[in-house]
Image: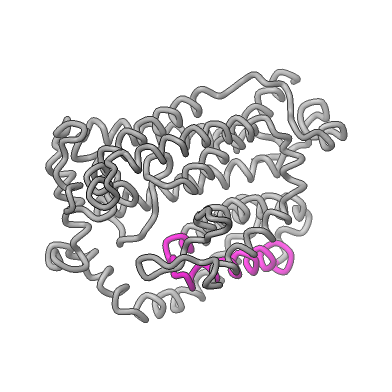
């Protein structure tokens, strides 16, 4: 991939650097926007279908999660529009502020008056009565940092102490804080994401391979250090042998897919969500989709995700500004990893990890952050479109 400076009239000029909102206000890439809107809409419907019984029993309101997800969706669309039109140069100037704020949030989560413990892990932060998962924001902060730093170190990117070491140390610091929550799945995404962005940015593959290979024994020791992690690995290899214990989620997830057949049993007609399949409206919503919409519905969801990822990669490849290109790549790879890991878990292709499915799973933090990232991706795509018109 060859990068050349963009024309000043296209994107990053001095006037724009002082402007908060970027114009023009036209050109939304429908190949990204429409799949996202469809997925969000499907998500609202499926969250209601998957959660109504649980919400009715535990909260006395079958529409509880539906109403919250609808509010998150509307707010998410607002964020998408905002980040589509905000100045990328302004966002770029806030890179280190964003990174520092993300670091403070991860530190605050370990203080009992801020951190919220649930399911044996402390992954939620409560500030002013608002609860959210900092890891979603941390992932975006790291993407911004890597895009900013790598784009400014191109002359020395091949040097270990300039291209690899500082980026690995920053990512490692955040990964360690997340690992202590514990949240191994998010650490995996961040490490893979960082490696891909560094490689595409010009860091020699040899450096990445050698260092990552050195950490393989550490990962192995981490996996066997806790009994529940070993149980997850064993149930991954043979979930049916542990159907009443560590393999319970996977078994019922596979039963949901098997019950769906080609066309599914119909929306709201699924059985596994009725207190059989844990977390049906969050981590395992794809299983509910498989049961109620069948292979056709699952295939349609995969096509929509595929369109977003394809267009995201195209934008990254065709954008001439290196910062914007790496930013688009990081956002797209982040989406891709979340989708692959979540779907892989529900289909027993990967060990169980608590990761949501973008745009579909219930959760305000995930949905709002992902919609903001789509807005940034559309913003970069618009710059590419304007560059083509100028040339």
Along the line of sight, the residue nearer the viewer: 15 or 5:
15
Magenta stretch contains residue 156 = no
Q: Position of residue 355 (x, y in %)?
A: 39, 54
Q: Position of residue 352 (x, y in %)?
A: 30, 61
* Residue 89, image quadrant: top right
Query: On screen, 52 above or below 231?
Result: above
Q: In the shown orientation, is residue 31 left or right of residue 315? A: left
* Residue 14, image quadrant: top right
Q: In the shown orientation, is residue 91 left or right of residue 193? A: right
Residue visible at 53% across and 55% down in the picture: 129
Residue visible at 72% across and 25% down in the picture: 387
Screen quadrant of the N terminus: top right
Query: On screen, 141 above or below 225?
Result: above
- Magenta-drawn segment: 160-188
Query: On screen, 81 above or below 147?
Result: above
Q: Position of residue 185 (x, y in %)?
A: 42, 61
Q: How is the image coloured?
A: one colour
User: Total label count?
Assistant: 0
Along the line of sight, the residue nearer the viewer: 152 or 46:
46
Q: Which residue is most to the front?
A: 60
Residue visible at 37% across and 44% down in the picture: 361
Q: In the shown orientation, is residue 275 left or right of residue 209? A: left
* Residue 385, image quadrant: top right
Which secondary structure dominates the residues rendered in magenta?
Answer: helix
Observer able to see residue 176:
no
Screen quadrant of the C terminus: top right
Q: Which residue is most to the right?
A: 14
Observer able to see residue 215:
yes
Residue visible at 74% across and 64% down in the picture: 162
Along the line of sight, the residue nearer the viewer: 232 or 7:
232
């Amino acid at each position: 991939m060859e990068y050349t400076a963009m024309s000043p009239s296209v994107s990053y000029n001095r006037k724009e650097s002082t402007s908060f909102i970027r114009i023009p206000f036209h050109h939304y890439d429908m190949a990204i926007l429409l799949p996202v809107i469809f997925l969000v809409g499907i998500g609202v419907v499926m969250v209601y279908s998957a959660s109504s019984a649980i919400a009715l029993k535990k909260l006395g309101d079958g529409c509880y999660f539906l109403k919250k997800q609808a509010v998150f969706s509307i707010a998410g669309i607002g964020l998408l529009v905002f980040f589509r039109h905000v100045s990328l140069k302004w966002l770029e100037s806030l890179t280190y502020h964003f990174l520092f704020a993300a670091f403070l949030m991860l530190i605050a989560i370990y203080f009992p008056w801020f951190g919220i413990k649930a399911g044996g892990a402390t992954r939620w932060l409560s500030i002013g009565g608002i609860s959210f998962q900092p890891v979603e924001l941390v992932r975006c902060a790291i993407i911004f940092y890597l895009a900013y730093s790598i784009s400014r170190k191109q002359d020395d990117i091949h040097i270990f102490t300039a291209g690899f070491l500082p980026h690995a140390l920053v990512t490692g610091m955040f990964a360690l804080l997340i690992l202590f929550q514990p949240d191994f799945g998010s650490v995996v995404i961040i490490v893979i994401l960082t490696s891909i962005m560094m490689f595409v940015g010009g860091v020699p593959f040899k450096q990445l391979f050698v260092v990552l290979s050195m950490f393989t024994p550490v990962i192995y020791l981490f996996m066997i250090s806790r009994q529940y992690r070993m149980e997850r690995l064993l149930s991954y290899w043979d979930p049916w042998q542990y159907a009443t214990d560590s393999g319970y989620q996977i078994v019922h997830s596979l039963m949901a897919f098997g019950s769906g057949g080609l066309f599914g049993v119909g929306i709201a007609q699924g059985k596994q969500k009725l207190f059989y399949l844990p977390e049906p409206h969050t981590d395992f919503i794809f299983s509910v989709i498989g049961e109620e919409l069948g292979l056709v519905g699952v295939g349609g969801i995969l096509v929509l995700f595929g369109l977003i990822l394809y267009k995201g990669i195209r934008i990254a490849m065709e954008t001439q500004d290196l910062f914007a290109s790496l930013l688009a790549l990081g956002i797209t790879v982040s989406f891709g990893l979340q989708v692959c890991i979540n779907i892989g878990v529900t289909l027993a292709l990967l060990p169980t990890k608590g990761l949501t499915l973008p745009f579909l799973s219930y959760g305000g933090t995930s949905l709002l952050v992902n919609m903001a990232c789509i807005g940034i991706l559309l913003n970069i795509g618009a710059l590419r479109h304007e560059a083509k018109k100028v040339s």
